[in-house]
Every structure is written in structure tokens, then in C-alpha cells.
């Protein structure tokens, strides 16, 4: 069965007390909230109005078991400061935006559980695709190493085939940034 990468739900517009925001549901328990400038797909403004001023902001939220809340900094689990970004928001505006967005997003997601499932399905599928690609790359490297061992056992120096840089582990294609004396070549058995 051939798989393809799945696009997660990323153009979900939600009205909040500070203005329209766009959600990107990247997995079951993570959402990126964008309240910056304008939506590229629909052209609507996502700039937030807080205390009479327009502010652009974004926020990562996670569900830690009691609904979505600002993502916690791993070095300080009680701090949500690093999950919020705005180049112009004051501390009071930052708090007002979080206070407006979090309940609005929780209410919206409670009303649309299919989005959470779609985000989780896309995340799982894309992770599987990534792992399968890593496995294919590792299998190619193993095959190249087996062929190298075989050529050493038989004493036949390979002259053509797969390019093999043993010093850095880059197999299968030339790397323009590679700094070796010279690549070794492995015989193509096809």
C-alpha cells in the first residue's frame, strides 16, 4: 500500500473576543493559533484588537488532560511564556489575548471533535511515512556496507556504482559539501 503525506487541518478560522484567528491542528493534543496579519487563503485580517490597539500574535496550545492551554516550556513546566509570540504586545495585551483565545479554542474544539481526530490521523500517518523513509535509507546503507565487505573479502576493488563516503557515512549520492580526499566507489551488481 502506497502512502502519501497527509495535510493536517490548518485553515480553521475561529472567532475570538479579540478577533479572527486561524488554527493549525497538528496532532491530537497540539494546536498552533495564528492571529497575525492576514489569512493567505481567504484574505481576511487576523490582526487582534486588544485594548484599542491592533496586535499580531501567535500561540501554541496543548491539551495536558484538562483542555487546551498554552504550551509549557520543558525547562520550566509552569511557564507558558515561550509558547506565545508577538513583537508588539505588552504584558497586559499578552495576558488578554491568552485569556480570550484559550476558552474560544476549547469551546470550538469541543464542538468539532472530528478536527482533533483528523489532526491526530495526519500526524500519525506523517510520522509513519518519515519512519519508513528512514528505514529505506538505513537499508540502503546496510546494502552498501554488505557490498563493501564482499568486495574486501573477494579482493576486487570496486570501480563504478554507488558512491560511498566511508568517513562521513553519506551513501548513494555525492554531497557537494563533503571534504574527503576522494570518494570510493562500490560495484553495481545489477
Image (cartoon, helix red, strand yellow):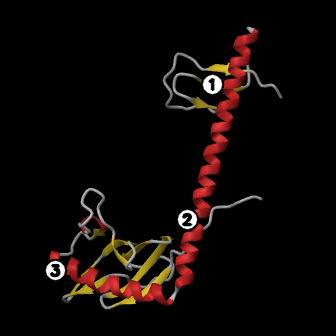
Q: Are marks 3 and 1 in contact (CB under 8 Å)?
A: no
Left-right relation of 64 to 124: left
Question: Label 3 to label 2, Cα distance in Å?
Answer: 34 Å
Eye-nearest disc, 1 or 2: 2
Which residue: 64% across, 40% down? 137
Quarter of the rendering occupied by the N terminus = bottom right
Q: Quadrant of the C terminus?
A: top right
Residue located beneath label 3 in the image: 92
Extreme residue in the top direction? 155
In this rendering, the answer to whether 143 lies above or below 113 is above
Disc tally is 3
Mark toward the start of the polypeptide (3 vs 2): 3
Q: Is residue 109 above or below residue 64?
A: below
182 over 100 or under it: above or below: above
Q: Tell me which residue sits at (26%, 68%) in the image.
A: 80
Answer with left or right where residue 4 lies relative to residue 175: right
Q: Find disc 2 in the rendering and name its residue.
A: 123
Front residue of 6 and 21: 6
Q: Read off the residue under disc 1.
A: 164
Amino acid at each position: 500500500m502506497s502512502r502519501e503525506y497527509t495535510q493536517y487541518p490548518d485553515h480553521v478560522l475561529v472567532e475570538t473576543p479579540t478577533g479572527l484567528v486561524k488554527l493549525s491542528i497538528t496532532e491530537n493534543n497540539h494546536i498552533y493559533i495564528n492571529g497575525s496579519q492576514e489569512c493567505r487563503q481567504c484574505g481576511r485580517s487576523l490582526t487582534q484588537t486588544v485594548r484599542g490597539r491592533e496586535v499580531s500574535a501567535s500561540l501554541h496550545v496543548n491539551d495536558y488532560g484538562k483542555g487546551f492551554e498554552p504550551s509549557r516550556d520543558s525547562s520550566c513546566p509552569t511557564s507558558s511564556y515561550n509558547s506565545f509570540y508577538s513583537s508588539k504586545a505588552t504584558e497586559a495585551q499578552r495576558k488578554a489575548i491568552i485569556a480570550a483565545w484559550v476558552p474560544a479554542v476549547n469551546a470550538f474544539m469541543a464542538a468539532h471533535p472530528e478536527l482533533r481526530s483528523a489532526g491526530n490521523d495526519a500526524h500519525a500517518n506523517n510520522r509513519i511515512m518519515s519512519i519508513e523513509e528512514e528505514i529505506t535509507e538505513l537499508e540502503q546503507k546496510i546494502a552498501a556496507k554488505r557490498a563493501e565487505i564482499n568486495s574486501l573479502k573477494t579482493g576486487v576493488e570496486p570501480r563504478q556504482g554507488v558512491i560511498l563516503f566511508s568517513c562521513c557515512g553519506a551513501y548513494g549520492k555525492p554531497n557537494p559539501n563533503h571534504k574527503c580526499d576522494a570518494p570510493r566507489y562500490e560495484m553495481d551488481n545489477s
